[in-house]
Amino acid sequence: PDSSCSEEEEEEEESDEQIAMAPKPRGSELQGKRVRVMWDGSTGDMETTSPVPVWYCGRVKSYSTSRKHTIAYDDGTFENHDLDNYDEEVWELENSWKARKRIVEKQRRERERRATEGTAAAATAKKGRLKRADGSTVNSEAASSAPTS
C-alpha cells in the first residue's frame, strides 16, 4: 500500500477528546470505517523491507469470521487483517488519530499564546518603569504625576 493518507474528513459529532478516548470498535462494527494500519516494513524481501514502521490508510470494506477485515487502501490495494487481534495488528481509527492531532495542535497554540502574552506583559511592565539617576526604578505613571519642584 501507499503510505500517504488522504485528508478525507468524516462527519464529526463528538468532541476531539471523546473521539480520541473512545474504545476501538470490533468485528463488523469496523465496516465502512477509515483506519490507519501500521506495517512493520517486513515483507520477506530484504530489498523492500523498511527499517521504520509505516502507517497506511484505507477503509474497512468488509468483515467475515474467516477472512477477517478486508481493507481497501488509498492506493487501490486490498488486504485482509485481523483488526480484532491487538497483539498482531497495530491500527487506529483515522478520526481518532486526527482528533489527537487537533488536540496536540490546540495545546501547542495555547502554550504559544501564553508565552506571547507573558512576553508582551513583561515588555509593557518594563516600558512603564523609568530608571532614576541612583539606579532605582519608578513607575512612569507615578513619576509623571509626582509634583515637580
Image (cartoon, rainbow, N blue to C red):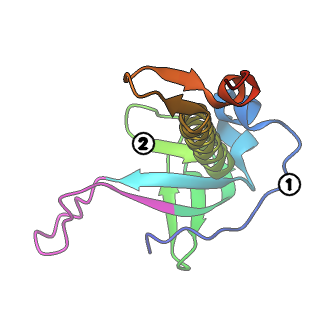
Q: Is residue 143 left or right of residue 56?
A: right
Residue closer to the observer: 109 or 141: 141
In this rendering, the label closer to the viewer, 1 or 2:
1
Residue 33 x %, y %: 71, 53
The residue sitting at the front extreme is 149
Which residue occupies 49% across, 23% down? 137
Residue 108 x %, y %: 55, 42
Q: Residue 99 magenta-drawn?
A: no
Is the C-beta separation of discs 1 and 2 under 8 Å?
Answer: no
* Quadrant of the rendering where the N terminus is positioned: bottom left
Q: Residues within 10 Å of mark 1 (few under 14, many from 20)?
A: few
Q: Residue 46 magenta-drawn?
A: yes
Which residue occupies 50% across, 57% down? 80
Disc 1 residue type (three-letter):
Glu
Checking the image for residue 89, the label placed there is 2
The residue sitting at the right extreme is 13
